[in-house]
Amino acid sequence: MIGDYLPILFVFLLAAGFALGALGLTHVVGPRIKTRVKLSAYESGVDPVGPTHSRLNVRYFLIGLVFIIFDLEVVFLYPWAVIFREQAAQGPFILYEMLFFLVVLLVGYLYIWRKGVFEWE
Amino acid sequence: MADTLYLLVLFPFIGFLVNGLGGRWLSGKQSGLVASLAVAGSFLIGAQLFLGLLARPEDNRRLVQTLFTWLPVGELNIHVTYVFDPLAAIMVLVITGVGLLIHIYSIGYMRDDPGIRRYFAYLNLFTFMMLNLVLSDSLVLLFMGWEGVGLCSYLLIGFWFSDAAKARAGMKAFVVNRIGDAGFLIAMIMIFDRFGTLSMADISWLAPGAGIDTTFITTVTLLMFVGAVGKSAQVPLYVWLPDAMAGPTPVSALIHAATMVTAGVYLVARNSALFALAPITMGIIAAIGTITALLAAIIAITQTDIKKVLAYSTISQLGYMFIALGVGAFSAAIFHLMTHAFFKALLFLGAGSVIHGMGDEQDLRKMGRLRQLMPTTFMTMTIGALAIAGLPGLAGFFSKDEILWSAFNSSGGISWIWLVGLATAGLTAFYMARMLFLTFFGERRWAEGVKPHESPSVMTVPLIILAFLSIVGGYAGVPEALGGHNALHHFLAPLMATFQASGEASQAANHPLELLLMLLSTGVVLVAAYYAYRFFVQQPGLPETAAGKFPQLYRLSNRRFYVDEIYALLIIRPFRALADLLWKWIDVRIIDNLVNLAGRTTERLGGALRLMQSGLIQHYASLLLLGVVFILLAVAMG
Amino acid sequence: MGSADILSTLPELVLIATALLLLVMESAAEPHRELLAATALGGLAIALVTALGYGADGLYYSGMLQVDPYARFVSALALVLAALAIMVAVPYLRRTLEERGEYYSLMLFATVGMLLMVKAQDLTMVFLGLELLSIPLYVLAGFYRHRSSSNEAGLKYLLLGAFAAGFFLFGIALLYGSTGTTSYSGMAQAINSGTELSRVLTLAGFGLLLVGFAFKVALAPFHMYAPDVYEGAPTSMSAFLSTGPKLAGFATLLKLIAVVFAGTMVHWWTAIWILAALTMTVGNLAALRQDSLKRMLAYSSVAHAGYLALAILVTNYDSGFAMLFYLTVYVLTTLAAFGIVSLLEEGEESAMPGVEACKGLARRNPWLAAAFTLALLSLAGFPPTAGFLGKFFLFNATLDAGYLWLVILAVLNSLVSVYYYLRPVVAMYMQPGKNTSALPIPRMLIPALLALAVVALGAGFIPAPLVHATASAISAIL
């Protein structure tokens, strides 16, 4: 029953305790030297210049999204292939299902193509 | 014979459709003609049905027509059933009869108004709704009519909507009425829960034998009475009626004097079987009626707007009807309802005629000496005033004295209800006489350029007919003490429950005593009228002297006992405060502090203060999370 | 698996095919945009015919979907709603020069999501339907890319919606952990026979599901997004946002409770009791102070969610019937009201018409003013409109179940609501407006107004047909 999950709770507590404990400990033990150099972003590196929030071209995101969507959807082909043999014996329905799925993907592909997602200029 | 019952409601509805949809093709006069014909049709049908009813034996005076089943849900079967019995008959004749006269009068009164078609459409719709209210057997349909007349009243009060104050008056009437309606609605649900039916005939039949506990019956009747208090403008919900005078004067006559405001009286009388089982409620009804009658009569004395005088007079007279209901004299209440419809409609229409003739002047202080210029209006209004004051032989005398006698009788002697009733009779005579004197006698006080003139015959003929009714209307119920046999009382008797508040022996048969009391009240009326004469004709300076002598009293009456201000304090403010609380505390404090916890800006919120919400998504998410915790806790606790 | 399955989802398939067609049309070299709306409406019409006429009742797709009169009724209502929402949107989109195929396509996908939710017989299916409904709505709320208010609405809706969806999914996981299944019948069996792993786990799972639904139908305190999103979204979209998810959410939740969780009611009735009371009060009180019509209608929709939650609380035949009746009236009325508001935006300087925009409307467009009045009166629950009957059925069912105080609170609330519903009416009829020329009423808006008249007045005067339809639908699950 629910009591079986008690160890998990302990793991949570342990993890949280460790994290908080470590942070707290450095806070207590660690020496604090507030010099100009210490407080700069990169103590031994180059001082950053200009705003930190630089804008990226929206196309990076679009391409990223498109990649993830198609990549994930293709994953469906694997389980489908695994049960294809067994299901196909009962009729061609499983084939149509996947064809329908691919048509949907194709229309989506056509749409983003026509809308110019792939044009980099 | 019952087959024609539906025509009663159909005619005004057709009139409404013709005027409402096809109004643009009609001239104003044609539109008025259509509306009047529709009501005339209803009146003729009603009269024919009434005669048919009279021809029947006393225990079988009930015509029923079921049109269709409106709602077939489980055990809740609501049929659209119209019932024409003695009570409905009287109401129908008053509504269509007086209504017809007011429709005709309106043709003249509203002649030059560009919205005349809309006006007649609303008026017909009102008649339709009002007939539904009095004819339906089911509480649900009655409630629809109830709301429907409220809607029409609201539309007509705000008829001249270009004027913002008038529009607001319409709103006020509506909102105040909704308070009462809430009570009615809850009562209805409770009744259905207990009796399993909403047919009033069934309820009246079931209630006495059902062995119902006092708490239940008292609660239900009280809630119902709350509805009646709202609609019939009783203390404390009367504040809307004086403001309702913003509407056209014929509307005030029809809706705010003769018919709609009496719906509360009708409701109680119709369910007399229920109310008779609840002595506590009856006591409260009598008390409210008494307070209203007195309070409104006192306020009426100092009002300077001719319509406001009549409005407070209406409230006071409605208080009379509730006194009658409260002491169990249900048929006396209906009797007074009928006579009051005659003379108060007459007085309002007369006032309308004066206002019309004076070029839209309503201030009594700017009238005076109009009796030669408006002879018909003067004559008819005098009759109306005499009738309402209760001059022996006129309609108001019989109905008022029946109420006073019932009040006297119910407690077996002199009681404060009776005393206040008597005092109110005197006050009524006083303020009515004052109104008459200020309007038609004394100095001419109207402004330069005003040319008072008598109204056209389309307006005066209805006045004459109503004046005639105000004279003879009372003979439907001449008491036995005066050698009559109280026909109306016997006509209604089979429908009305009997109720005796105290264990005192009834003195109903003590004719000499009744005669003595009549003489007494007549005396009070005459004395009051004489004082009004002295104040306002002989020595016009006297009112100021009196007001100077009792400044607090005068101001109290003139400012209507500060009721509107009290309302603002007691009801409107807390309500706003609640909304403010929600806004300032829940929103600003709690959510704001969440923000501060997150270390977010407060100044951005300052700009968003106007809005209910901060607009910041992190607050929404925090609240969402709180909701999750709440649900999980609630589920875990349960 | 086979043709019977396909037949059972014919409406969904038709809609998906139409939605794809719309995308293809949109990506054509020279898109014929004037045909887009007609295509979408055609697809919806075919889907409506198939939803009502085709396929036998029963379980399909290995028990994932169930077709029954209840699902058919709600599906038909959802399809009609979507069609009317598209018709309301057409003039709005054309006026603002934003008519694009994506709008209609996404509307159709969202509709498919609604259909799948009510047909679902398995929580995974419910979740898929819910996401299919939600994701297009996130996009549609932010459809007007160049309006910052629309962007804000879309983003807020997405972020909070994702948050709520996470809880919903977690709830499914807990229920699966407790009962070992996600199918309605399997869970019901486990719960009723006591073979679940832990009652606490089951209840926690149900509680989290409730969070997901409460967010979709905007129950307080999960309603916070609603006013901002409905106000910021294009008005034609607000019409659908405030009706579609409510319809699908309540219909699905009622079925879920009726089939699976009815036996555990003792544990959760307090939670729903409080949610309902809180929602109707917060919604109505907040609406009191609103000047913007869209915001007022948004809070009104929150308040109505509170009333509808009463049906969930009771979950018996009477309350289910009342809920379907109320929902039917509510969605069509609200849709028409938003449609009229979208019309009022024309010629206003700001895109958010306030109550003043109504001034003098009765003179300018008497029929439009009458329709708006009718919608508001029905929402306020005036007799003899159907809104009154809906409230009557709902409150009566709740009272019969013994929740007297809740009913009193609900009645008081609906009285408070009269105030803000009547403010536009007063403005329309009793205050003169600056503008006196009549607004042109687009033809596409007329069906929505007719639907409003039929349901608010027709079902008010002659309720029998709608009563019979809803009663026979509800008897399939309760």
Image: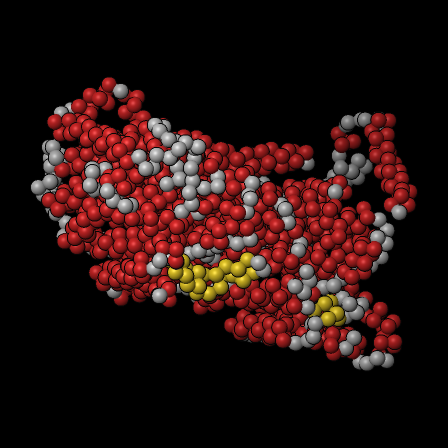
In terms of depth relative to the viewer, which is nearer, C206 or B95? B95
Residue B568 sits above or below residue B247 on the image: above
Q: Nearer the viewer, residue A33 or B441?
A: B441
Q: Residue at x 29, y 45 (%)?
A: B486
Q: Residue at x 87, y 41 (%)?
A: A9
Residue B56 visible, this angle: yes
Total residue callouts: 0
Residue occupying the point 65% across, 51% down: C314
Question: Which quadrant does the C terminus of chain A fall into?
Answer: bottom right
**What residue appears at the point 19 percent right and 28 percent down from the top-left corner?**
B527
Residue C128 position within the rendered picture, expressed as x and y whole percent measured from the top left: 72, 61
Is residue B133 left or right of B584 when viewed as pictured? left
* Residue B101, horizontal then vertical, whole percent: 23, 54
Tell me if I can see residue B355 in this picture: no
Which residue is nearer to you in this view: B457 or A85? B457
Q: Position of residue B122 (x, y in %)?
A: 33, 55
| Quarter of the image where one finds residue A119 | bottom right
| Residue lying at the far left of the rendered structure | B372
Judge left or right: residue C415 versus residue B100: right
Render colour scheme:
secondary structure
- At which x and y percent is residue B575? 49, 36
Of residues A55 and B246, the one drawn nearer to the viewer in this rendering: B246
